[in-house]
Amino acid sequence: MSFDTLGLSPTLLRAIADQNYTTPTPIQSQAIPLVLAGRDLLACAQTGTGKTAGFALPLLESLFPNGRRPTNGSRQVRVLVLTPTRELAAQVHESFRTYGRHLGVTSTTVFGGVGMQPQVDALRRGVEVVVATPGRLIDHMQQRTVDLSGVRHLVLDEADRMLDMGFLPAIKRILQALPEKRQTLLFSATFADEIRTLAARFMRDPAEVSVARRNSAAETVEHVVHPVDAERKRDLLLHLFSLDSDQQTLVFSRTKHGADRLAKQLGAAGLKAAAIHGNKSQGARTRALGDFKAGRVTVLVATDIAARGLDIDQLPAVINFDLPTVAEDYVHRIGRTGRAGCAGRAISLVSHEEGGLLADIHKVLKRDIEMTEIEGFTPSRPLRLDPRMPKPGQRNQSAPRPARPHADRSGQQRAKGHAASGRKASPRHGGQAHRQGSGAPSRRPR
């Protein structure tokens, strides 16, 4: 199938060709005709499948039929896209600009962490597409600096992530402010019960499209676990980078403080590293991501705020310095690699204390991950995959409670008394993009 068969105008096809994209992905080939037909859509697609183009292209076609602006078309908000993070909002906005470059589409982003006045100015000038995070959009609604009365198309992108982040009340408030007569598109990595409840309440007989089984990882990703004592994780990470210090790699830390500390330690070891997390200003986050994409930074240390929405072409490797506390987030983390048919590598440094988390991940993936000990880093305690093990930060409910301190006669508080070896591994993936019969790589829009 080619884009020529999907009902898009020559103007949009020209923009697609400008990007050297040749073949639509499964989510694009299924979603675009449904969106063009005006159907509400409930789409399940893992990250990296090209879902942004799956809604941006047909919505641009709806705004500019046959590649032309309607003669009576006013510059008011017609398309509203809600995303969970600032980074994803910026990337979706860039996609609309890229595909709408020959149409003259006007668009803007609305998210926190930056001043409101430039957003107010853009909204006052008039835009047809707004890509927003829920919190900042509500700020504009409260100050009456945005008019949503003309919205005809609503997209909830990464809807499951927005629910995970507690945006449901904000989403409901925004939906209630929109015209009832509209097209609603909901994209999610899962069809969890909460997603279906949301769809049932705010969508009209939605068509369903699913291009990946629930909580699945890309088949092009190679998974490996390196057992290691928690206190030796940093040394093992440095060892892996010593094998290939130029490998562009995304490293996940469980906490913001841990991400900052690890980035500094990697920098002290001579690596070009930066950290990105929720406590960073929007400017710092944008610079770190830009430097990573441009190759000025080779190691980006991130918390789960970066697990979704970071659009990095052909990232070779992802390393879990800490396993996520929610097993499903493993899939979203490693979704940064192995995208659009390219090979990738997901490496996890797992301590004895994280055995329960790894067991949960195995259940989500419906498969076991290969475990390879690195010579010189054999853990002092074997890695035991027991889902009953307490998660990091939780107390073992079966263990005896620590003795409670009590006061002695002086009034002071006191407590009651009572090596293997294996093959070495590197973040290098060594894989090549899948190629078509012509020998040229098949490029697909994001």
Image (cartoon, rainbow, N blue to C red):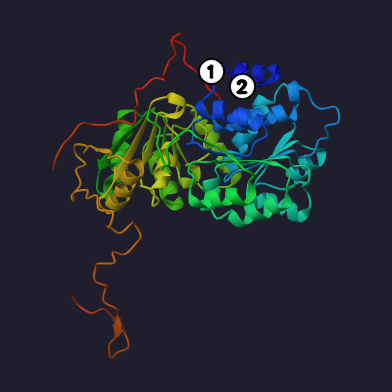
Residue at x 72% of width, y 30% of height? 62
Q: Position of residue 388 (x, y in %)?
A: 27, 58
The one of 235 and 184 positioned closer to us in this rendering: 184
Q: For residue 120, which quarter of the picture?
A: top right
Q: Quadrant of the C terminus?
A: top right
Q: Position of residue 45 (x, y in %)?
A: 50, 36
Secondary structure beneath dot 2 equals loop
Disc 2 + disc 1, Cβ < 8 Å = yes
Say what amino acid the circle numbered 2 marks.
Leu
406 in relation to 291, above or below: below
Name the N-terminal-most of marks 2 and 1: 1
Give the residue pinned by disc 2.
6
Give the residue pinned by disc 1.
1
Residue at x 44% of width, y 32% of height? 298
Residue at x 38% of width, y 52% of height? 325
Q: Position of residue 302 (x, y in %)?
A: 46, 43
Horizontal arrangement in the rendering, residue 114 relative to residue 21 (left or right): right
